Amino acid sequence: MIRASLDQSEISEYLSKLTSSKYWRVRVESEVGSTQDELKTELVGSGDGVVAEFQSAGRGRLDRKFESAPHVALLFSFYVEPQRSDAHGWVPLLAGMSVATTLNELTESEIFTNKWPNDVITESGKVCGVLCEKYGDGIIVGIGINVSTLPEELPVESASSIFIASGIEINRNRLLAHILENFYRLFMQWESGAPLKPRYRALCSTIGHEVSISLPNGTVVNDRAIDIGENGELFLESGSVVSVGDITHIRPSS
C-alpha cells in the first residue's frame, strides 16, 4: 500500500480547481500537539486551516484521546465565523455531512453515514470523528479520519477506516480538498437559509435507530431516535430532546 505524505502544493493544486479555493488558507505541519491548538497560534480569520501528519495530543469528544499512526489518517482543523445564531447546533452537523458526502462521492458508494451529531460510520465501525470548539467570534472544527488504516493499526475495536470499509485507497491531499469544498458549499447554503435538515436526515443512520445516550450529567437514556430539530437537536420517541450527548447505536438482538 502506497501512503503518500501530505503535500502543501498538492493540496493547493486540488483546491485551485474547486469553487471554494479563495476561501481556504491551509498549511501543512509534520507534527503538532493537536491541530486545533496549532490553528490558534496563527489564526487570521474564517477559512484558516491546519493539517498535520501526526498529532501527539489529539483529542475527541468528552476529552477522549484521539490516536493515529503517521501517514494513515487525515487530521485537520479549520476555523469559520458563522453569522447565524444557531451555529452551535448546526456547524457540527455540517462538518459531519461534508465528510460523509465526500467519502460516498470518492468511493462511489452510499456506505458512509452520520451518527448524530457528526461522527461518520460504516457497518465496519467508526471512520471519522468531529470536535467543534467555540473560539473567539467563531468555531474551530477539528476532524480526524482513518484513511488507509489497517485492522491491526486501529486504536479500538469499534473503529474502522475508509480502506477497510471500501477497499479503496484515497489520496489524503485530494480528500482534504474535497471535504473543504463540500463543507464550504453546505456552509454557504446554510448561511443563506437553505433547508438542510432533509439532507442531514438522509445521511443520518441514527434516525429510526434504537440508541443509548450518555448525557453530560452521567445519566444514560435508552430510546429511539425519530427526528432532527430545527437547531440540530435530536428528538426521541419518548418526547425528550437531546442537544448534547454521546450516542451508541443499539444493534438488534439476533
Image (tube, grey):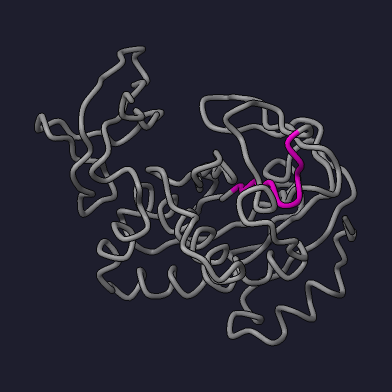
- Quadrant where the C terminus sits is top left
- 202 vs 94, left or right, is left
Query: Where is 47 relative to 189, above or below?
Result: above
Picture coordinates of residue 156 (x, y %)?
A: 65, 26
- Which residues are drawn in magenta? 142-151
Q: Is residue 238 left or right of residue 169?
A: left
The quarter of the displayed image where residue 235 is located = top left
Q: Does residue 145 show up magenta in the picture?
A: yes
Quarter residue 26 falls in: bottom right
Question: Which residue is rendered at x = 20% and y = 33% of the image?
Answer: 224
Q: Residue furthest top?
A: 218
Which sits in the foreground, 254 or 29? 254
* Residue extending furthest toward the front: 254
Circle count: 0
Identify which residue is drawn at 80% across, 62% down: 27
Find residue 74 and report its horizontal and vertical position in percent: 72, 52
Q: Is residue 194 above or below residue 110?
A: below
Q: Position of residue 15 (x, y in %)?
A: 70, 78
Q: Position of residue 217 (x, y in %)?
A: 34, 14
Q: Is residue 212 left or right of residue 6?
A: left
Say which of 182 and 87 sits in front. Answer: 182
Of 99 and 216, the residue lying toward us: 99
Q: Residue at x 75, y 48 (%)?
A: 73
Q: Quadrant of the N terminus?
A: bottom right
- For residue 172: magenta? no
